[in-house]
Image (tube, rainbow, N blue to C red):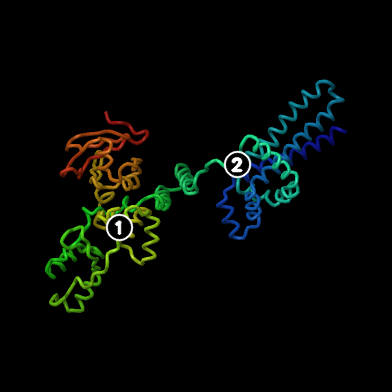
Amino acid sequence: MSLVFLGLTVVLLVAISGFFSGSETALTAVSRARMHQLEREGSRAAREVNKLVADKERMIGAILLGNTFLNILISSLATEALAPRLGERAVVITTILVTIIVLVFAEVLPKTLAIARTDRFALNVAWLLRPTVGLLAPVVGLVQAIVWALLRLVGIGRTESDPVVEPHEEIRGTVEVHHREGAVEREHRDMLSGVLDLRELKVADVMIHRKNVLAIDANQEPQELFEDLLEARHARVPVWRDSPENIVGILHTRDVLREFVRRHGSLEGFDILSLMTPAWFVPDTTTLEEQLAAFREQRSHFALVVDEYGALQGLITRNDIFDEIFGDIPDEHERTVRRGVRPQADGSYIVDGTTPIRDLNRELDWNLPDEEASTIAGLVIHEARTIPEPRQRFAFYGFKFEILRRQRNQITALKITPPPAPGALSAG
């Protein structure tokens, strides 16, 4: 065999081996979501990629089979051609030479290209790789049968698989990585995370607590009842009788005003309570995803929340769930970062104790834990293992907390000083 022919043959085999190596890297790292979208848009190449990835075990088996065969063939041909010329040194020289050629041109170079242009590489090779995989399928199937037979000998069944990351967590991780790389803005990351959190958060995590629920007494005179309804400034207002926790119905402000106008502004003979609608009670353990679906099914967006004993815990509206996705949207009269959060000149914040930790994390890009408590006051009490007194100070998770006001057993206001930003110079 002439050296020229040998060289051309080796170049061809190395190119084919590089094709297999790059294809393996590209097709195992390709974005399945991107390929799915391209296929929906009519891309035939994306359809071929999806068919290959659908049976990844067979695809990888065929690629490894072809790659291994080619690399051994390259080494054998080179050794046979150089042995008469180099004698006993042929094996050593051929091993070193072939290793360098295969490593650079059949492994590192195509794999690096596949990593740099993953989707494009996969789309370009799929049309040629798919018939190759089909051609090698019988051999690959035999190899797979032998492999699984050997694995069964050590107690590993084919149906067994290690736990994998749930799709929701995979999406969350992908969004977070792109955010750190600057490709996804914080607001978009928070919205996507909010959607993913709907299946994990309970109604109790975002509801308006019963202490903050505005309700009116059904035993009042019509004039007082009407005035309280207007002062509430809500579209729907719960009505209680005898006890604030005994909700007997819901008044729709719009319905009351419409009837008031129809009566030409007269309350005489106006039975406001006759316009009440039945209250809808939901368990506090309902997930936000389930509650949003229930709002859609019931064609309502207002529900009262009760615990397992039927005791009133608060209320939740559709907007409360939307706030978890889009964040709190202040009205034109608010000048603070969020209701109950007042930034100070020294970089600290005066925060109402009932402020949810999730809202602080989202609005201020903090990372305070919310597993043990839902409000910032609850977090301080949990960490302090006691109900602090005013002017007491604590430090945990890199934040400084100072209790400003306490009403009975409830922390109503506190000052929070976040840790300095990375790279910031401390005063003094």
Q: Residue at x 62, y 38 (%)?
A: 112
Q: How many marks?
A: 2
Against 240, residue 102 (above or below) is above
Of residue 354 and residue 415, the one placed in the foreground of this image is 354
Image location (x, y in percent) of residue 13: 77, 39
Image location (x, y in percent) of residue 233: 22, 63
Against 322, residue 408 (above or below) is above
The residue that label 2 is drawn on is: 115
The residue that label 1 is drawn on is: 316
Kindly state the secondary structure of the residue where label 2 is placed: helix
Image location (x, y in percent) of residue 131: 73, 51
Tag 2: Cα neighbours inside 10 Å, few (<14), some, or many (≥20)?
some
How far apart are the alpha carbons under marks 2 and 1? 48 Å
- On screen, residue 203 versus residue 24, left or right, reads left
Residue 327 shows in the view: no
CB atoms at circles 2 and 1 under 8 Å apart? no
Of residue 202 and residue 97, the one placed in the foreground of this image is 202
Of residue 244 and residue 192, the one placed in the foreground of this image is 244
Question: Mark 2 belongs to which amino acid?
Answer: Ile
Question: Mark 1 belongs to which amino acid?
Answer: Ile
Kindly state the secondary structure of the residue where label 1 is placed: strand
Would you identify the image quadrant in which residue 8 lies? top right
**Tag in front: 2 or 1:** 1
